[in-house]
Amino acid sequence: MNILAIETSCDDTCVALVKATGKKWPKFKILSNIVSSQVKIHRKWGGVYPALAKREHQKNLPMVLKRALKKAKSASWRTKIDLIGVTIGPGLEPCLWVGVNFAKKLSQDLETPIIPINHIEAHILVNFVSKSQISNLKSQIFPAVCLVVSGGHTQLIWMRDFGNYEILGETRDDAAGECFDKIARILGLGYPGGPAIESEAAKLQNTNYKLQIKLPRPMIFQKNYDFSFSGLKTAVLYDFKKRPPKVRKSKIYIRKMAKESQRAIVDVLTKKTFKAAKEYKAKSLILGGGVAANKELRKQFKVQSSKLKINFLVPPKKFCTDNAAMIAASTYYQWLKRGTEGWGEIGADANLRLG
Ligand code: KG4
Ligand code: ZN
């Protein structure tokens, strides 16, 4: 089954061509996976500006498709594509429509069926693209607790099996990635903030320099599985403002603040996720979304899951941030489950929910 997948839910224009085979544990061969990032354009706003992102998607999508086809060496692709998959939500509505309309047009031109894809589910299912990750686990993977942490979402999900989800908790305000982005902006580190904060934090040497920074861990001890990150960003802003300009511009302050912010976010995510894993007696922990690329988060999850003796699945870093290979994988799973009929009219849904 040759799948052409399209993803435009935020600020990356992505197209992938993937060959998928098999049923229970499918095999995926990624022929091409092109990501055209708009980071440079959004940098000056310190975050994604939807109208601008939509315009860029419109401009870039035909070129990105061409590059994906070229990379896959798919000259006669018109006869070779069996299925088209496209992200319909959740995400930024104007951006989603660009991908959806493009996919619909292609589907008509090629007379190829189209399957609508949930972006959050794709962040989870990309974990099953890498063979080495699951080859030894298989029967023990489910039920699993999944944490999807990205620029737009922070959700803790109970996954009984493929396609069977229940949201246990989510953020009440900012997403974890958004918190990284906002803190980076306060510190003047640019966008996207997650990688910038990670890299500043890593530069901090052991030092006796007496600069104390202690941030809150919002909702860490609350009984529910919800999150809240906007207070953390405000705490960083207060601390930043109360420091003399000389201090807050210093490398040591920026690095210490980066490290403490990263710690605070990772502490909350780890504590709540593993509380859910214990309570629900999960067999695995599945991580996904852009923030899953964070080394400290990956390390804490690895340590905690090995203490709890449960599986830990995390995608390679390049599959954590938005890409269309994850959309292709989801498309195949949906096809296995429901085939190509009965999907109804396909349209964007900015607030699409799992479950
Ligand atoms: O999944 P994604 O590419 O897009 C959305 O669906 O939102 O996630 C992007 C988010 C951004 O907020 C970015 O700062 C964050 O993921 N991110 C990271 C890292 N790499 C990307 N956060 C922490 N550490 C990283 N290494
Ligand atoms: Zn995403």
Image (cartoon, rainbow, N blue to C red):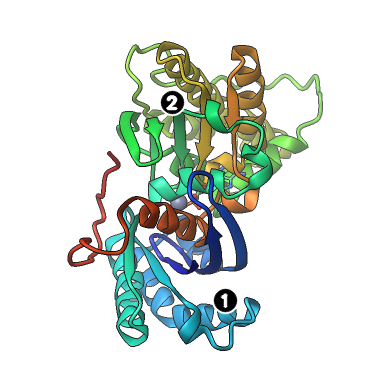
Q: Quadrant of residue 55?
A: bottom left
The foreground one among 5 and 153 is 5
Question: In the image, what residue occupies the spot 48% across and 50% down?
Answer: 23
Dots 1, 2 in contact, CB < 8 A: no
Q: Position of residue 194 (x, y in %)?
A: 57, 44
Q: Tell which circle, 1 or 2, labels the residue nearer the N-terminal end.
A: 1
The foreground one among 80 and 269 is 80
Q: Position of residue 212 (x, y in %)?
A: 64, 19
Amino acid type, mark 2: Pro
Numbered disc in front, either 1 or 2? 2
- Reply above or below: 79 against 168: below
**Apparent side of residue 133 relative to residue 267 in the rendered image (left or right):** right
Amino acid type, mark 1: Ala
Q: Quadrant of residue 48?
A: bottom left
Question: In the image, what residue occupies the spot 37% across and 57% down?
Answer: 335
**Gap in Å between the C-alphas at discs 1 and 2?**
35 Å
| Visible residue check, residue 338 | yes
- Reply above or below: 17 against 293: below
**Apparent side of residue 116 relative to residue 235 in the rendered image (left or right):** left
Q: In the displayed image of the protein, which residue is found farthest to the front? A: 23
Q: Quadrant of residue 103?
A: bottom left
Question: In the image, what residue occupies the spot 65% across and 38% down?
Answer: 135
Kindly identify which residue carries mark 1. Answer: 68
Circle 2 packing at 10 Å, graded few (<14), some (14-19), many (20+), is many
- Reply above or below: 242 against 64: above
Q: Position of residue 69 (x, y in %)?
A: 57, 80
Kindly identify which residue carries mark 2. Answer: 143
The foreground one among 176 and 29 is 29
Classify mark 2: helix, strand or loop. loop
